[in-house]
């Protein structure tokens, strides 16, 4: 009985933490492009959070509720083993978009960098 109660309490804590983290997700984020002359990306953050439901997919180094901007770790230039911002975004975003079953997620430059 104790194990079941502990399991239920743990599950409730996880669900609550995810709900709190997702509730704080901004609707949109403007991602400014530093290295290229491409237009900024208007990133629909809340839509992604609602669809993915796991902040750690992108905010892979942050605790729930303490997520930081990708640029906090991924700088304009590569530092050590950490990919630079452009590579991190292109690798993570494009790979996920390629797996999109609906085929609506953009995989080409002008799909995200709107003129």
Image (cartoon, rainbow, N blue to C red):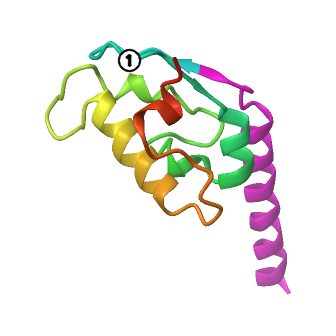
Using the rendered view, name the quadrant where residue 36 is placed: top left
Task: Classify residue 28 as left or right of residue 63.
Answer: right
User: Mark 1 falls on what kind of element?
Assistant: loop
Q: Residue at x 32, y 12 (%)?
A: 37
**Front residue of 3 and 8:** 8
Depth check: give the residue in front, 53 or 9: 53
Front-most of residues 102 and 70: 102
**50 within the magenta span:** no
- List the single residue furthest toward the left: 80
Total number of numbered discs in the rendering: 1
Is 4 situated left or right of 29 in this image? right
Q: Position of residue 11 (x, y in %)?
A: 77, 66
Residue range of the region highlighted in magenta in the rendering: 1-29
Predominant secondary structure, magenta span:
helix
Number of residues whose C-alpha sits closer than 10 Å to that of mark 1, classed few (under 14), some (14–19) or many (20 or more): some
The answer to whether residue 64 is left or right of residue 82 is right
- Residue at 57% across, 61% down: 100
Where residue 106 appears, x then y in whole percent? 53, 44
Q: Residue at x 31, y 30 (%)?
A: 86
Say which quarter of the image contains residue 8.
Answer: bottom right
Where 17 falls versus 85 (above or below)?
below
Residue 76 in sight:
yes
Rendered view: 112 above or below 75? below
**Relative vertical location of residue 8 with respect to residue 50 in this rendering, above or below:** below
Is residue 53 at least partly visible in the picture?
A: no
Q: Nearer the viewer, residue 27 or 107?
A: 107
The residue where tag 1 is placed is 38
The residue depicted at 47 percent of the width and 58 percent of the height is: 98
Task: Judge from the rendering whether residue 24 lies leftward or rightward of residue 57; answer left or right.
Answer: right
Q: Quadrant of the N terminus?
A: bottom right
Q: Is residue 18 magenta?
A: yes
Percent x, y of residue 19? 80, 46
């Amino acid at each position: 009985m104790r194990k079941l109660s502990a399991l239920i309490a743990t599950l409730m804590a996880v669900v609550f933490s995810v709900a709190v983290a997702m509730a704080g997700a901004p609707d949109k984020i403007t991602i400014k492009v530093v290295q290229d002359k491409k237009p900024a990306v208007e990133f629909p953050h809340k839509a992604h959070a609602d669809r993915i439901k796991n902040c750690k997919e992108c905010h892979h180094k942050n605790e729930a509720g303490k997520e930081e901007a990708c640029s906090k770790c991924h700088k304009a230039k590569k530092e050590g083993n950490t990919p630079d911002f452009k590579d991190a975004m292109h690798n993570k975003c494009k790979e996920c978009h390629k797996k999109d079953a609906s085929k609506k997620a953009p995989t080409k430059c002008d799909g995200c960098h709107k003129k």
